[in-house]
Image (cartoon, helix red, strand yellow):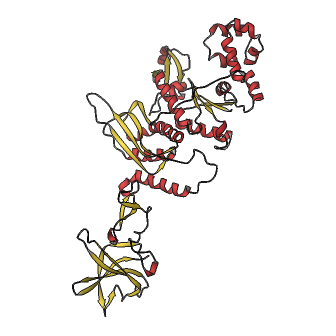
Amino acid sequence: MLWLALHLPWLPLEALPCTLPLPRCVIEQRQVLVMNRAAREFGVEPGMSASSAASLAPQVQQLLRDEIREAEFMRALALALSRYTPNVVLLNDGVLLEASASLRLFGGVRALMRQVRATTRDCAAHARLGLAPTAMAASLFARHGLRACGKPRMQRLLDALPLATALDRLAQPRLVELLQGIGCRTLGEVRALPRAGLKKRGGGELLALLDRAHGDAPDPRAWFQPPERFAMSLELMHRADDAAQLVFAAQRLVQPLAGWLSSQWLAASRLRLKLRHERGRRSAPDGELLLELGAPSRDAAQIMTLLRERLQRHQLAAPVYAIELQLDEAVSSAGTAGQLLPDPGQAAQEFQALLDRLASRLGADRVQRIALGDDHRPERASVATAVTATPSGHRGSGFAGPPVSPPGGSAKGASGGTPVWLLPQPLRLNERDGRPLHGSPLTLLGRGERIESGWFDGDLICRDYHVAEGEDHRLRWIYSERHGDEIAWYLHGLFA
């Protein structure tokens, strides 16, 4: 087995969402627990009393530690990392991934660690990564950014670790004083001590930890179980007056969604982003953004791009204090989070992603595709529909392009079929010596095609369509229709 561990040293701060770059620190038991870089520049340090930090830097915002938010943040991160392996373990200050079965899929150890690190950053977390054949050793290595794929190197690195790395996990201050008093500074020096004597002096728990780290004792772990349905909310620390300010917060919800979809072998087809406004005297009804994808996807970058486009165009009815991302519809997906071979449908997927971005930016009703209608009349044989939906009763035929031949006809270029575009209304043509005119007398090419339909709705047509050529060698699509005793000619379309 090979374990990849993530340690989050700034978890108490990162679990408190903020849309503004303010100097902040987290307070626990009236002491500074952790701070961001902006607060450190003002002189705030860990362990400093809250009163001293306030007098030294009054502009630094002090926030109380919220362990409930930290737990929610860790669950969201575990969901996001589920795209790499289903074997995920939640820790108090990090995440464990059993990655031995994922190495080949994601291109090896280094490539996998790069992707895990990128996903963690997208979740607004900064992690230190550790790698080892045992779960306990990986979690210890993560505090120092160490890696070991084999047991001999793992044991050497474990023996060289500072004693405080393991003692931080054990609430035994007397044992710390005892070991430091006899000169132990590393885990290797503790292992060299007589086990029986150390157990008598309260070191049994420390020895058990070292045995699990070296692989000499079993270390069972409980796997993280993703929810059956995806719906995740995020409360903002500061109100958002502009929808563009919600982009950063939405990123923290999209990454867990992508991980959940990968773990369930699904692709999202419709999402809903709910905007929670202030409750009370000035309450406003919750707003929402409905996001429909033309092609179902579980790619976090694509989903985030579509949400960003929608948010940047949306006008808030009132300040937003919380958001919720809900998955309305998903379809089964046979793809994988990584790819061993190039995807032959990659070009089509990229084209569909472009259509989704255009629909999010311009509006779904302004980006349309052509769908076939169940009607032989050419002007009703095709219907323009939004790219994100295929209306019932019509068969999707792809995005742009000409209205295809009506049922009963065939696209044969100069000998029959429909042209690229039809005229909005057929144009009545004059005649000379029994030949239709359009700039010059037209010559009929090939056999005609009769279309007779519309009896079922009272708009009956009976037309004989021909491909005709003028002296300019342009091809026209014309038809003749009888009006009483007279036969009239009409231009209905032009070939490219």
- Where residue 325 appears, as percent x and y from the top left, is 42, 38
Q: Does residue 289 appear left or right of residue 340 in this picture?
A: left
Give the residue at x 33% y 87%: 437
Outermost residue, left side: 484
**Percent x, y for residue 189?**
76, 15
Q: Is residue 55 visible?
A: yes
Could you tell whether 129 is left or right of 363 in the image?
right
User: Quick check: 153 above or below 176?
Assistant: below
Q: Is residue 264 above or below residue 378?
A: above
Q: Is residue 182 visible?
A: no
Classify residue 487 as left or right of residue 20: left
Across and down, in percent, residue 320 comes to 36, 35
Instruction: Return the residue found at the far bottom.
Output: 433
Q: Does residue 51 appear to the left or right of 95 in the view shown?
A: left
Query: Residue 313: horizontal and vertical position, in percent?
Result: 38, 47
Q: Is residue 234 above or below residue 66?
A: below
Q: Nearer the viewer, residue 42 or 343?
A: 343
In depth, the one of 474 and 197 nearer the eye is: 197
Q: Quadrant of residue 133?
A: top right
Q: Looking at this view, is 39 or 7 the one in front?
A: 7
Count of labels in the image: 0
Position of the N terminus, as image quadrant, is top right
Residue beneath the point at 56% across and 55% down? 346
Say which quarter of the image contains residue 440.
bottom left
Residue at image point 35% right, 59% down = 393
Which quadrant would the C terminus be assigned to in this image? bottom left
